[in-house]
């Protein structure tokens, strides 16, 4: 299925010149000018001032007609129908003047600056602001008169059968790798006849239970980001074998969609990608509802309903993950793959690593460096993601400081700029046996080797830190405190605690706030404190939120049946994801909604004999360093059912043709949640994954930044943090701040740098939307 993912930018319509010589302008004589404001003397006429030069007759106000119009768009089987409207500007309420018009939401349609003619595009519904500007050269302050009004676009869309604009699903890589645009299941069905359509539109029989007809995936109350591919709707039904057709209905303020498809015995159906995009980008803050109806050709059953929320922002960065049995390898090797949310298929993280097993990876938060183990599970290397994955350093034998390079960076906590990492010591599958310490990427040496760096507060307190992780600002380190003498009354808990220390290396900032390379010669650890302890649980894989104020971590329910499987995902291991703030009195809690439990601790996940309790099958979280749409975003491994597409043994790692449940999932997390409240929302399956591959350990990072002058979409892509139009008002390119406040995703050092009168906040050096109220 050839469906492209789109990055959307709201743009103003270009400001064109106006005046009597504009051949495209719509300008009539209006009412009798002799009757306006005491008369009009044509002998005193001024080309820039229809009232002449009499001081009492200068324009004092500007209005736009029509005021707040609603423009309807109808789209039937891809054919867009709408009626253009013409905005007219009036001076002093009655005199038509040749104003210039702009629109703040270019995706709603095209507004011709010189004529005021607006034509809705059908790309998105919603409300935009139309601005009229007119300068007669006679205003006391020399400025232009300005008037605004709104324009609202509504879309009513229907599609009968597969859109003709979409090719067969088997014709592209998304089918080969992920199956049906990376979500699996059935392709769009063919068109239904008028009789069947009438049955689906007519009275329907309400299902008596979820078993008769009920959703399996997605989940009610899911928060969807813009730019993500449409989900595959999956359901169960006692009428499945008799099903002949299905109707999908989407509805939100200003937008409706009805899709009709022949579906012989089908129990899943994709949402029309065009309708999905319009719903997400046109959402106005209300809920997006989906209804599904099925029919056997005589009776219609339904609807089954879910209500979703839309985050008004696209997901940024890239997720790097381990994959087994990928079709992108030349043999049945493990491999590290990369996928961008919104993409239809993964790619190799590093070219050339498909000929032997490369797994067990760590990535710097700035997207510049990746560490991977090779097929020996002992040797490894670091690679430069800014330079086509060239090798930075291979780690074999011993480093110059005499320490063994075996698995040195395996499960390590990489400093945000990638230059060094805190090693993870023992107690994780395929671990290294060194005591935990800071090791330099480019040499493999201890940071203190050679005497140029002094380290304080660490080796005296910590011997074994397991799966450590640096905060986004580089000023904290979280870890499982397995062994060591401790300090300040905090002791090691043999795997049962999550601890944190502050880290100071005189680091500066880049990108308006993200940490730069360490600037001092002392690397100081201090203030060891325990965030969570449970003698019956093993914890690991902590990931900081972008504001460095919270941590999401893996909390084992049942350890796997193997040596060093306490915080693993296999051999029957069960785990939940938890959240804690990092304040003086942390309040750790299970993230019910993410794990699959509602507010009453009741599972809302589907079950079968293989999956009786999927809310215990969630592991290894990392967080996107860039907030988006008012939320933080976490990617994690889960062995839960993926509807009816992947519902087999949760511990099947992929030896045949069955779809594997071990996959990556994504969930929204509230920004600055009140202490003791669950900040999470139901998760969604990350599209684009290969269905027959086992995927795990998603590592979410920003992409390497672009230098000034390079094309961009948003400021987070740029090394200097700003994406603005070039000097000629043309394409968007990376640049320095060309003036004014910083928009969403642009660089900042404080909230005051951000636009929006308090609607944006500065998080991890970038302006971000605040959580919806």
Image (cartoon, helix red, strand yellow):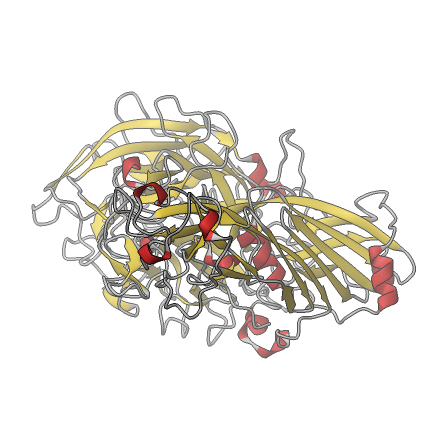
Looking at the image, the residue that sits furthest to the left is: 451
Looking at the image, the residue that sits furthest to the right is: 298
Does residue 689 show up? yes
For the N terminus, the image quarter is: bottom right
State left or right for residue 712 relative to residue 242: left
Q: Residue at x 21, y 53 (%)?
A: 419
**Location of residue 162 (image quadrant):** bottom right
State left or right for residue 590 relative to residue 731: right
Residue 354 vs 668, above or below: the answer is below
| Nearer to us in this view, 513 or 520 | 513
Does residue 368 show up? no
Q: Residue at x 40, y 25 (%)?
A: 586
* Residue 440: % across, % down: 20, 52
* Residue 696: % across, % down: 49, 55
* Residue 72: % across, % down: 64, 56
| Nearer to us in this view, 570 or 245 | 245
**Location of residue 719 (image quadrant):** bottom left
Q: Residue at x 26, y 22 (%)?
A: 488
* Residue 732: % across, % down: 32, 62
**Location of residue 377 (image quadrant):** bottom left
Residue 295 vs 288, above or below: the answer is below
State left or right for residue 45 relative to residue 524: right
Callout count: 0
| Nearer to us in this view, 259 or 671 | 259
């Amino acid at each position: 299925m050839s469906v492209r993912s789109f990055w959307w930018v709201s743009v103003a319509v270009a400001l064109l010149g106006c005046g009597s010589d504009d051949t495209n302008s719509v300008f009539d004589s209006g009412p009798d000018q002799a009757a306006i404001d005491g008369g009009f003397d044509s002998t005193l006429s001024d080309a820039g001032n229809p009232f002449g030069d009499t001081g009492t007759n200068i324009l004092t106000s500007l209005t736009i007609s029509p005021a707040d119009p609603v423009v309807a768009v109808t789209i039937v089987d891809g054919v867009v129908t709408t009626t253009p409207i013409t905005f007219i500007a009036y001076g002093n309420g009655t005199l038509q003047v040749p104003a210039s018009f702009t629109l703040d939401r270019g995706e709603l349609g095209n507004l011709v600056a010189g004529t005021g003619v607006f034509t809705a595009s059908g790309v998105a519904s919603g409300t935009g602001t139309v601005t009229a500007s007119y300068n007669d050269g006679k205003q006391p302050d020399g400025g232009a008169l300005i008037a605004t009004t709104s324009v609202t676009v509504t879309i009513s869309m229907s599609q009968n059968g597969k859109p003709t604009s979409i090719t067969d699903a088997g014709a592209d890589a998304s089918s080969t790798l992920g199956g049906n645009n990376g979500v699996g299941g059935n392709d769009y069905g063919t068109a239904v006849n008028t009789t069947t359509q009438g049955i689906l539109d007519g009275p329907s029989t309400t299902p008596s239970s979820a078993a008769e007809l009920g959703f399996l995936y997605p989940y009610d109350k899911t928060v969807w980001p813009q730019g993500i591919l449409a989900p595959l709707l999956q359901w169960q039904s006692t009428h499945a074998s008799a099903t002949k057709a299905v109707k999908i209905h989407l509805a939100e303020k200003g937008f409706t969609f009805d899709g009709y498809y022949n579906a012989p015995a089908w129990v899943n159906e994709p949402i029309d990608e065009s309708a999905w995009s319009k719903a997400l980008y046109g959402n106005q803050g209300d809920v997006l509802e989906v209804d599904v109806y099925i029919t056997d050709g005589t009776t219609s059953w339904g609807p089954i309903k879910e209500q979703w929320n839309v985050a008004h922002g696209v997901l940024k960065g890239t997720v790097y993950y381990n994959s087994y049995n990928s079709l992108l390898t030349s043999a049945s090797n493990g491999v590290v793959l990369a996928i961008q949310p919104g993409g239809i298929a993964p790619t190799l993280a590093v070219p050339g690593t498909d000929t032997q097993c490369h797994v067990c990876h760590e990535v710097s938060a700035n997207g510049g460096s990746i560490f991977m183990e090779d097929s020996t599970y002992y040797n490894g290397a670091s690679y430069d993601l800014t330079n086509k994955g060239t090798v930075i350093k291979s780690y074999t034998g011993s480093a110059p400081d005499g320490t063994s390079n075996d698995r040195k960076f395996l499960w390590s906590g990489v400093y945000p700029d990638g230059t060094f990492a805190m090693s993870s010591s023992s107690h994780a599958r395929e671990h290294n046996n060194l005591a935990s310490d800071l090791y330099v990427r480019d040499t493999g040496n201890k940071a203190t080797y050679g005497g140029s760096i002094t380290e304080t507060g660490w080796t005296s307190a910590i011997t074994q830190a397991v799966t450590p992780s640096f905060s986004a600002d580089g000023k904290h380190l979280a870890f499982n405190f397995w062994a060591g003498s401790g300090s300040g009354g905090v002791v090691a808990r043999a795997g049962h605690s999550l601890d944190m220390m502050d880290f100071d290396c005189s680091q500066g900032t880049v990108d308006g706030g993200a940490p730069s390379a360490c600037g001092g010669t002392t690397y100081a650890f201090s203030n060891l404190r325990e965030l969570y302890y449970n003698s019956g649980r093993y914890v690991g894989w902590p990931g900081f939120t972008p504001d460095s104020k919270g941590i999401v971590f893996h909390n084992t329910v049942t350890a796997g049946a193997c040596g060093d499987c306490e915080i693993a995902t296999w051999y029957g291991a069960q785990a939940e994801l938890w959240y804690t703030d990092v304040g003086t009195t942390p309040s750790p809690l299970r993230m019910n909604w993410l794990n699959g439990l509602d507010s009453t601790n009741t599972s809302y996940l589907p079950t079968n004999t293989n999956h009786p309790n999927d809310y215990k099958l969630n592991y290894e979280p990392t967080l996107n360093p860039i907030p988006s749409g008012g939320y933080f975003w976490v990617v994690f491994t889960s062995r839960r059912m993926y509807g009816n597409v992947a519902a087999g043994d949760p511990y099947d790692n992929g030896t045949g043709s069955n779809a594997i449940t071990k996959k990556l999932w994504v969930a929204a997390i509230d920004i600055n949640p009140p202490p003791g409240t669950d900040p999470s929302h139901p998760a969604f399956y990350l599209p684009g994954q290969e269905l027959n591959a086992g995927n795990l350990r998603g590592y979410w990072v920003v992409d390497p930044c672009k230098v000034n002058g390079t094309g961009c979409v948003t400021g987070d892509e740029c090394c200097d943090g700003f994406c603005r139009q070039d000097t000629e008002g043309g394409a968007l390119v990376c640049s320095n701040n060309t003036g004014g406040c910083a928009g969403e995703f642009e660089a900042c050092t404080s909230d005051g740098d951000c636009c929006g009168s308090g609607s944006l906040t500065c998080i991890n050096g970038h302006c971000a939307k605040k959580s919806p109220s």
